[in-house]
Amino acid sequence: MTTHISERVQALAPSATLAMSQKSNELKAQGVDVINLSVGEPDFETPAHIKEAAKRAIDENYTFYTPVPGYLSLRKAVSEKLSRENGVSYAPEQIVVSNGAKQALCNVILATINPGDEVIIPMPAWVSYVEMVKLAGGTPVAVNADITQDFKITPTQLRTAITPATRMILLCSPSNPTGSVYSRQELQGLVDVLAEYPDIIILADEIYEHINFIGSFTSLGSFPETADRTVIINGVSKAYAMTGWRIGYCACPLWLAKAVNKLQGQYSSNASSIAQKAAEAAYTGPQDCVEEMNRAFERRRNLVVELARAIPGLGVNCPQGAFYLFPEVSAYIGKTTPEGNKIASSADLAMYLLEVGHVATVDGGAFGMEGYIRLSYATSDDNIREAMARIANALAQLK
Ligand code: PMP
Ligand code: GLU
């Protein structure tokens, strides 16, 4: 049969983070000793009390379909978490639990964006945002914030990007891929602009909330001026080292929660019942595991920044959250490898670092910013030291 792929899927770019990670795993399978700094996921095991809750859920037969938006007990736990930790008020009916924050984001975008609608995305941004907006037929509008502004957009930039077609802004803080964190004051500056445009939905991806080294976290949902149209995306993947369990959620206005519920009811139903019970344990159980992991990430952040700053030619900021470093590498673009190949882009550089340095990173171009690479430092101190030594050595060979 001839292949028949929809234009919708043909137009999608594959996920560069997942592709690079797969390439690194393939090289590893061939016996190459690759250090994988590409995919962003905590390297810790899921805490024991959460795993126990999942085992109990199986024994207690939490094995049937659940309500489409998730068990009420889990949505209550999320609602309480939002109020306790973030000072925001979303009733259980305003929460829809999905297969990870990824599906929660895609649900909200598909439920609100029509062809022609513009979605403002500060760049660099996580690889999937632009593709999700394209899937909905919307138009991504990039607002660039490079290292000179610590990768954070200003209120003036935001105002300039808004047009009558703007339907949404998608903001991620702490940020993937840069680790930058907007302070409460910086968020207030953006909210002041958005308050003038009541038809713009604010989609706040707060998945890295707990991996945050500034000591406090401000949720975008906590600004009364815009709270009624702010959608919070969060989940257990990063805070509780539960990437494989696939539990995330949106907390949103009731009209939107109903629309998301309808959409999800037709194409995936509920997230795994067992994983939902595990997530409930994560939100209601002891929280010291979150703080312990955060401390480990902060120590690694300090290490990776110190080592990266010692490499000539890299532009390195000091990220305040998440587990990514986004060094500027343009000093190496235009150079030539010992084999005589030209490094024409940051994508070429990431490939060179993988093939010659045996370190997997992700090209900044995949996040909408050429001239940078992303390193995920969610790995051991030893791996970080070895990876940075390999990167330094590979870069030193470029002429
Ligand atoms: N948002 C951001 C910014 C992310 O980095 C990720 C992880 N890839 C997600 C959402 C999705 O997380 P998950 O689907 O694992 O909950
Ligand atoms: N958050 C991760 C990353 O950016 C997971 C991979 C993905 O879903 O993109 O690497």
Image (spheres, helix red, strand yellow):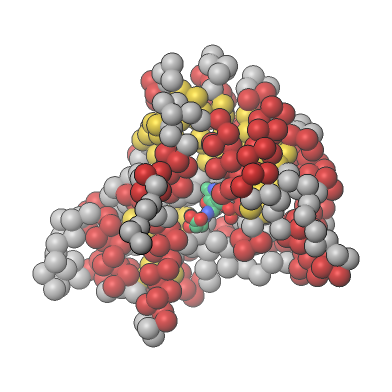
Q: Residue furthest left?
A: 340
Which residue lies at the image location 86% right of the left edge and 65% below the top edge?
A: 61
Report the front residue among 73 and 193: 73
Q: Quadrant of the N terminus?
A: bottom left
Where does the image place residue 289, in percent across and percent down from the top left? 72, 61
Q: Residue at x 22, y 57 (%)?
A: 332
Residue 183 vs residue 131: left or right?
right
Asked whether the viewer can see residue 174, the reply is: yes
**Quadrant where the C terminus lies?**
bottom left
**Residue 49: quarter of image:** bottom right
Q: Nearer the viewer, residue 292 or 34?
A: 34
Q: Is residue 369 above or below residue 357?
A: above
Work out which residue is located at the far front of the displayed protein and give it. 1
Quarter of the rendering containing residue 161: top left
Q: What's the residue at 29%, 47% (across, down)?
A: 370
Q: Nearer the viewer, residue 42 or 22?
A: 22
